[in-house]
Every structure is written in structure tokens, then in C-alpha cells.
Amino acid sequence: MLSCATTSRSGTAEASISTYADILQQTLDLDTLQSHFYRQSDGTAYPLTIADDVLANRAGIPSVTKFGQPVTFITKTLADSAKLPAYFWVIDYQQFGDDARIQLEDPVRHILLGVAYKRTASGWRVETVFLER
């Protein structure tokens, strides 16, 4: 199972939540990240669960999907108590005007992914991506 938790974020207004969901969706769909999702023995990906205290406790969460299924949001406390064997953790998300950035960590495989975005007339565009092992 793959899960994420958020430790910091700028603002929690509805527009910010919607933008966060958009940025998270784009990040989960990046080619760079695809080989790092956990797979079952038959090659299918595990369903994606994201530990996020802000989104887990909200009704009407903007749609985020992976592998054709809605992402399930749970609290970080629940993710920790469930002792998930493999997960991604959203260690940082910030948005300032037309700039946004997000960082995901896989603490099991020791992978860090960072993505910076710039808002354009057509939506959020990836500016930079880094992946460290």
C-alpha cells in the first residue's frame, strides 16, 4: 500500500485545498514517479492511500485518483498505527501566488521527490523535478 502524509501547507481555504488536490494529482501522474509505486506479485499496483490530516477530515474532498480508483485519505495517526509496510509521505506542500511546490518521501526505499510548479493560463505547469535516492 502507498500512502502519504502532509506536514506543512500554506493556507487551508477552499481554493488552496482545490489547488493542493490538483498539484497532488499532477505529481502522482508524473512519469518520474510511476516506477516507484508498489506492485503486487501479478504486477498490478496496490491501491493508493494518502495520510493527510487536513483532507482526511473533510467532506467533499476534490477528486484525486490513481490506477483508475479514487485515492483514499486517512489521518497520519491512523497510517502510523496501521504500520503500513510501504508508503509515500507528503513532507511539504506550499503555494505562494503563482508558484507551488510539493515534496514526497518514500521512507522505506529512501526516495525523495520534489516538484515545483508555476501557474499558467492553462493550469499548473511543472517547472522542476528532482528525485534523490
Image: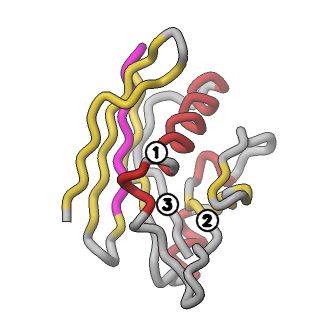
Q: Can you tell which quarter of the image residue 42 is in?
A: bottom right
Which quadrant would the N terminus be assigned to in this image?
bottom right
Return the residue at label 2. Answer: 49
Question: In the rendered image of this protein, does residue 132 appear above or below residue 99?
Answer: below
* 78 vs 113, nearest the viewer: 113
Residue positioned 40% across, 66% down in the render: 35
> What crowding class fits label 3: few (fewer than 14 Cα within 10 Å), some (14-19), or many (20 or more)?
many
Is residue 98 shown in magenta? yes
Residue at image coords 48%, 58%? 5
Main secondary structure along the magenta-highlighted residues: strand
Mark linked to residue 2: none
- Where does the image place residue 129, in percent across and percent down from the top left? 28, 41
Residue 27's tag is 1
Say which element carries label 2: strand
* Disc 3 target residue: 4
Magenta part of the chain: 97-105
Marks 2/1: CA–CA distance = 15 Å
Residues at marks 3 and 1, CA–CA distance in whole angstroms: 12 Å
Going from N to C along the chain, the mark reached first, 3 or 1, is 3
Q: For the residue marked with disc 2, what is the amino acid? A: Thr
- On whether residue 35 falls in the magenta region, the answer is no
Callout 1, which amino acid? Thr
Q: Position of residue 93 (x, y in %)?
A: 41, 39
Say whether residue 108 is left or right of residue 3.
Answer: left
Q: Amino acid at mark 3?
A: Cys
Relative to residue 121, is residue 53 depicted above or below?
Answer: below
Residue 21, x across and y down, in percent: 59, 38
Q: Is residue 23 left or right of residue 109?
A: right
The residue sitting at 50% across, 28% down in the picture is: 11
Q: Are marks 2 and 1 in contact (CB under 8 Å)?
A: no
